[in-house]
Image (cartoon, grey):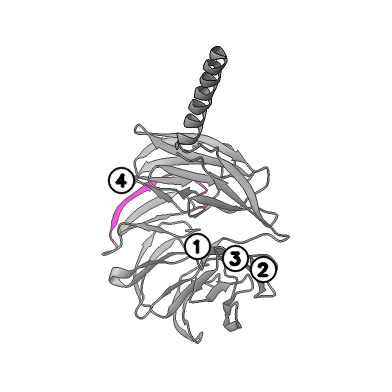
């Protein structure tokens, strides 16, 4: 009897130890990187834009698909023409241009507020400041509309088609925009006056980017310039790659440049000096920085590339293969990446927890 009791107490003690380690260990379980298809459409999507804490996109059918946070996605018909531009939402109104050159102000609740036909297609995004909406068109013009009524208040001749989204610099109420005539322009937000031009000598296919009061622009022939936003003076100008279609990408103290042949460069942000080059052998779409030490970019073949900065060095790896064609870049949404694919779907990539 005594031996049986000792054995029972021993077994109970072992059970208590097991329960202690299973229930008392609060260390979070590490998760692996994962990706999933979060939306499946039937028409190619344009670039994504923010929408009421969530995101939105338009498609080849002229539809607006909105994904508000915590709500079911909804589809609204905006245009009879394809829309590849990113939508801009402000106070419940969506501003976006279509590929027939019509710029729309649309309310999902009340329908179209107003529209204006420019002289050619619109593929860049709009910006809104102080009651004015600014948008560039392939008709060589940058327009400023009164957001409430759609009245054209200013128009700026940009010399050639505009593919890009303007960049605002609020401290001195100016706007920066590149066009296919190769010139980076500085424009007054007050009256649309042209305040200066810097010639990069080949088309500027995408938007400039701004960080800490410095504007970075990249031409198709790979000329990278850094310009002081306050006085519009060049800080440096360097030759990088040929065949650049994506804008530069800023990550910490570095700027990433991508070429159409799959070449990617990391350069010093302060002076443009080359740090490292990767030959990837496939077209790389617009890169996306996540913090100061990580850059992602999806290839045309649907492979997700990652660059990580550690121990004073950038390393590269492929973290996912979506096995679908992609022509647009990644978009950061919270802690996740959203990637539109060619079939009209949206892929979500989530990194492992640290």
How far is mark 3 from mark 1, CA to CA? 40 Å
Q: What stretch is highlighted in magenta?
A: 233-246
Question: 305 or 300, which lies in front?
Answer: 305
At horizontal 67% and vertical 68% (from top left) the residue drawn is 82
Mark 4 and mark 3: span between their CA atoms? 45 Å
Q: Is 292 placed above or below 227 here?
A: above
Q: Position of residue 12 (x, y in %)?
A: 53, 24
Residue 314, above or below 224: above
Front of the two marks 3 and 1: 3
Rounded to the nearest angstrom, the CA distance separating label 4 from label 2 is 41 Å
Of tags 3 and 2, the one toward the viewer is 3
Which residue is identified by label 2?
Answer: 82
Upstream in sequence: badge 4 or badge 1: 1
Image quadrant containing the C terminus:
top left
Q: Earlier in the sequence, mark 4 or mark 2?
A: 2
Circle 4 residue:
271
Residue at the spot 61% in from the left edge and 71% down from the top edge:
98
Query: Where is residue 269 drawn, in percent x and y?
Result: 34, 46
Q: Label 3: state its secondary structure.
A: loop
Badge 1: residue crowd in 10 Å (few <14, some 14–19, many ≥20): many
- For label 2, the SS is loop
Which label belongs to residue 71?
3
Percent x, y for residue 38?
A: 64, 54
Q: In the figure, 220 relative to 13: above or below?
A: below
> Which of labels 4 and 2 is toward the front?
2
- The residue sitting at 49% across, 58% down in the picture is 206
Q: Disc 4, disc 3: CB below 8 Å?
A: no
**Tag 1 or tag 3, which sits nearer the N-term?**
3
Ranked by sequence position, the earlier of labels 3 and 2 is 3
């Amino acid at each position: 009897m005594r031996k049986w009791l000792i054995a029972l107490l021993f077994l109970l003690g072992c059970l208590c130890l097991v329960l202690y380690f299973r229930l008392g260990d609060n260390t979070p379980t590490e998760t692996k990187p994962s990706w999933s298809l979060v939306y499946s459409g039937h028409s190619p999507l344009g670039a994504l834009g923010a929408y009421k804490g969530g995101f939105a996109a338009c498609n080849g059918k002229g539809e607006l698909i909105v994904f508000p946070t915590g709500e079911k996605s909804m589809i609204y018909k905006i245009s009879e023409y394809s829309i590849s531009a990113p939508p801009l939402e402000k106070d419940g109104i969506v501003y976006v241009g279509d590929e027939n050159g019509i710029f729309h102000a649309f309310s999902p609740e009340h329908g179209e507020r107003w529209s204006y036909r420019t002289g050619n297609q619109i593929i860049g995004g709009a910006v809104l400041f102080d009651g004015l909406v600014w948008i560039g068109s392939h008709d060589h013009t940058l327009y400023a509309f009164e957001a409430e009524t759609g009245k054209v208040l200013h128009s700026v001749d940009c010399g050639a088609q505009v593919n890009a989204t303007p960049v605002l610099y609020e401290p001195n109420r100016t706007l920066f925009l590149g066009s296919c005539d190769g010139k980076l322009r500085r424009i007054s937000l007050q009256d649309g006056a042209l305040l200066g031009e810097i010639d990069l000598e080949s088309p500027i296919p995408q938007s400039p980017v701004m960080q800490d009061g410095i504007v970075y622009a990249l031409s198709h022939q790979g000329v990278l310039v850094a310009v002081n936003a306050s006085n519009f003076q060049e800080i440096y100008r360097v030759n990088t790659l040929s065949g650049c279609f994506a804008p530069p990408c800023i990550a910490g103290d570095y700027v990433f440049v991508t070429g159409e042949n799959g070449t990617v460069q990391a350069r010093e942000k302060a002076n443009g000096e080359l740090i490292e080059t990767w030959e990837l052998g496939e077209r790389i779409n617009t890169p996306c920085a996540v913090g100061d030490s990580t850059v992602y970019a999806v290839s045309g073949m649907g492979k997700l590339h990652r660059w990580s900065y550690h121990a004073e060095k950038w390393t590269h790896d492929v973290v996912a293969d979506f096995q679908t064609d992609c022509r647009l870049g990644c978009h950061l949404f919270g802690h996740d990446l959203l990637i539109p694919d060619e079939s009209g779907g949206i892929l979500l990539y989530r990194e492992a927890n640290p």
